[in-house]
Amino acid sequence: MTQRTAALLDHFVPARGAPALAAAARSVACAAGGVLLLALLSQVRVPIGPVPVTGQTLGVLLVGAAFGAPLGLATVALYLALGACGLPVFAGGQAGLAYALGPTGGYLVGFALAAALLGRLSARGWDRSVLTCAAAMLLANAAIYLPGLLWLRHYLGLDWGATLAAGLAPFVLGDLVKLAIAAAALPGAWRLAGRGAAR
């Protein structure tokens, strides 16, 4: 893959060459929109055991890849901070530091890691084709699950078999569906951006 620095967002809402104030306003507006997307998708919730299946991860995948590493990470970090401060943006309208440090805490940390990772991979062109985009999404999901499972095991005092049964197995099918949606949407958006630039 050839290295590039422009995120998908830059093709639809360019910042290069804009005055500093306008570029800052654009970043703030995009971050606010990303937080709203994450908050809305978080309300898509199916409770299964201690950790619910939600639309949050789909939002993280889309924001991380489309915004790029710096803005994607900042957006997810803002979402987490607002939720920890009491705004009902987490799954099922939950909020507060106690929730953020509960069974889902490790997954929430993983959201930030996944957004940063996807932003870096997308900057190298991984979001341009369905195959490489799906591979990037798999790596991002691993970045979510690793701290999520480690924290869940510690929090609930489970062995690894019980941890995987509670915190991984029930969500694989749903995550594959969300991965497929993101892996189709992002290359499709790039094709749309290319057609727009050619006009």
Image (tube, rainbow, N blue to C red):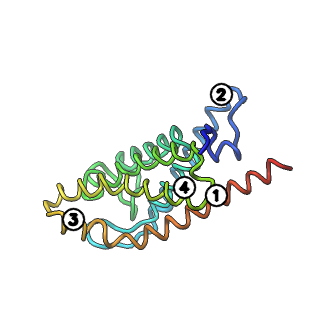
Q: Residue furthest front?
A: 1
Q: Nearer the viewer, mark 2 or mark 1?
A: 1
- Amino acid type indicated by mark 4: Leu
How far across and how far down the image is residue 177, in percent?
49, 71
Which mark is on residue 163? 3
Which mark is on residue 62? 4
Q: Determine whether the residue tagged by mark 2 lies in a helix, strand or loop.
A: helix
Q: Estimate the spatial distance between the alpha carbons at disc 4 and disc 3, rounded to whole Å.
A: 27 Å
Mark 2 or 1 closer to N-term? 2
Which mark is on residue 187? 1
Q: Determine whether the residue tagged by mark 3 lies in a helix, strand or loop.
A: helix
Mark 3 or 1 closer to N-term? 3
- Name the residue at 68% across, 31% down: 22
Q: Nearer the viewer, mark 4 or mark 2?
A: 4
Badge 2: residue crowd in 10 Å (few <14, some 14–19, many ≥20): few
- Amino acid type indicated by mark 2: Leu
Q: Estimate the spatial distance between the alpha carbons at disc 4 and disc 1, rounded to whole Å.
A: 11 Å
